[in-house]
Amino acid sequence: MKRILLLLATIYFTSQLFAQVNVNITDIVESRLNVDDTVSVWITVGDLTELGIISFQFNINYDSTVVNAVGINTSGDISFSDWIILPNIDKSDQIQVAGFGAFEITGSGNFIELLFVVVNPVGFTNLTSTEFLFNNGTPSANVSDGSITLIVNQPPELDSIPDQTIEEGDSFVTIPLDDHVEDPDNPDNQMSWTYSGNTELTVTIDTGRVATIGIPNINWNGSETITFKAMDPEGLADSNDATFTVTAVNDTPIIAGLPDNVIVYVDSTYILNVWVYVEDIETPDSLLTYQFFAVPDSIALDFNDSLGLLTIVPDSEFIGTADLIFIVTDPDSASATDTIVVIVDQPVSTDENIFNQIPKGFSLFYNYPNPFNPSTTIKYEIPESGVVTLTVYDIIGNKVKTLVDEFKDAGIHNIKFDASSLASGIYLYRLIANEYIMVKKMILLR
C-alpha cells in the first residue's frame, strides 16, 4: 500500500512539474479617448483547475508616455476568495502584481484586469511580461504579450468612383456608394453623402446610399463632373470626382401631321408649308435637305428652300390623282419619308353650285385649299334629292358651325366655309345625306 501511495504521489507531483498555463494579455484598440480616460486590459488564463496554484506574481512593462497604470480589478472569472492581492503601480513603466491564498484557485478566463489612464490620446505601447510565475514557477506560464493602441477619429477615405460614358438615350449605371468608402471608426450607414458640380444631370441618393444619375431628356448629350462627398458623424470628410458623359446619337427627322391628300384644281396652284410638318431635334428646318417626287410625273413641283414652301402645279391636261413622295434628310444622312395624295380636279366656283350631271353616288371631298386661312371650299355630291346636313366640329367633337341643313337636289354642290373667328387647329366636317355619313379633316393654319 505504501508503494502505491508513493507511486500516486510521484505521478501527481510529476504532472504538476510539467503542467503549463496559457496566459494572454489582451490587445486593445481604442479611438477618440481623451487624456485621463480609462483603458481596461484583461489578462486571461487557461484552466487552472487541479494545478494547485496558491500564489502568483507577474511584472508587465508599458510606455508611460502613452498610459499610466492606476490599479487592478479581480472580479473576473477566477475567484480569489480569501486571497491577498498586492498591486504595485508606483514603479514607472511597470505594473507589479502578486497574490497568495490558503486555497488553490480554479477555472479559466478573465484573470486580472489592468487599469490604465490615457496620457497621450494618440499612441501605442506594448504590454510585455518580464515575469509571470505560478507557485514560484510550477506550473509554468506560457505568456502572450499584448498592446494598447490609441487613435483619434480618422476621416473616411473614398476610392475612385468610375467615370461613365453612355450613348444618348441610354441610362447610367447606379452607384452603390458603400463600395467606395472606408472608415475605420464608423460603419457605412453612419456616413452622410452629398454631391455637387452637376447643373443639368440630376443626382438622387436613396436610404441605402445608392446614387442614381438622371438625364434631363432622352435627347440630351454632354458631360458633367460630379463631386461626391462622404462625411462621418464628427464632420470629417473625403470627396472624389466622377465624370458622366452622354455621347450624341443622330436623331432621324420626323414628318408628322402631313395631310393624307390635297386637292388642286386644273389651272391653279397649291402651296404646302413643308416646315410645319417637319421636326428634327438637332437640325433647324432650313439645314435639312428636301426631295419631292410625283408619281405619275404630271405635277410640277417647286420648292422654296429659304421659306420651306412647296408649290404644286398640275399639268393643264391632267385630271386624277398622283402620289407626292416627300423625303427629308439631315446632315448625317438620316431620313424620313411620307406620301401625300394629290387630287387634281376641275375648278369650281366659290359659291354653291348645282351642275347638270347627276353623280352616281354620295361623295364628300377634301376641302380646298387645305391647310387654309381663313376660308376654304367643301365639295360634296349626292345622287338623289333629300335633306343634307354639313356640320363643322373641333378636334374634341364640339360643334363649331352648321354649313348646310336643308333639302338639296341631286347633283354636285360646293359650300364656302369662313373660319375668320376660329383659332388655328384641326377641324372635322361631317356630311349626312339620307343614310350616307362621311367625315373629313381640315387644317386651319394662321
Image (spheres, rainbow, N blue to C red):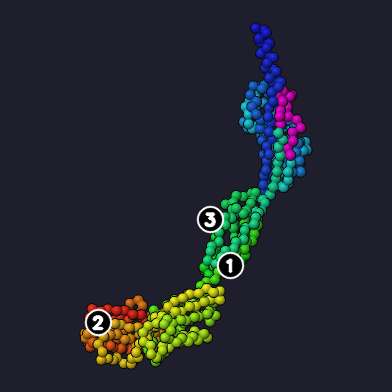
Amino acid beneath label 1: Thr
**Which image quarter: residue 107?**
top right
Residue under label 2, please give it. Answer: 433
Tell me if mark 1 has few (under 14), some (14-19) or many (20+) residues whose alpha carbon lies within 10 angstroms of its own: some
Extent of the magenta region: 126-143
Circle count: 3
- Location of the C terminus by quadrant is bottom left
* Residue 170 left/right relative to 231: left
Mark 2: amino acid: Ala
| Residue type for callout 3 | Thr
Residue at coordinates 33% horizontally, 80% vertically from top-left?
A: 440
Residue 192 rendering spot, x and y as whole percentages: 59, 56
- Residue 17 located within the stretch drawn in magenta: no
Nearer the camera: disc 3 or disc 1 = 1
Sequence-wise first label, 2 or 1: 1
123 vs 423, left or right, is right
Q: Residue visible at 64% across and 57% down?
A: 160
Instruction: Residue under label 3, please give it.
Output: 207
> Quick check: can you spot residue 64?
yes
Q: Callout 3: helix, strand or loop?
A: loop
- The residue wearing badge 1 is 247
Marks 3 & 1, CB-CB < 8 Å contact: no
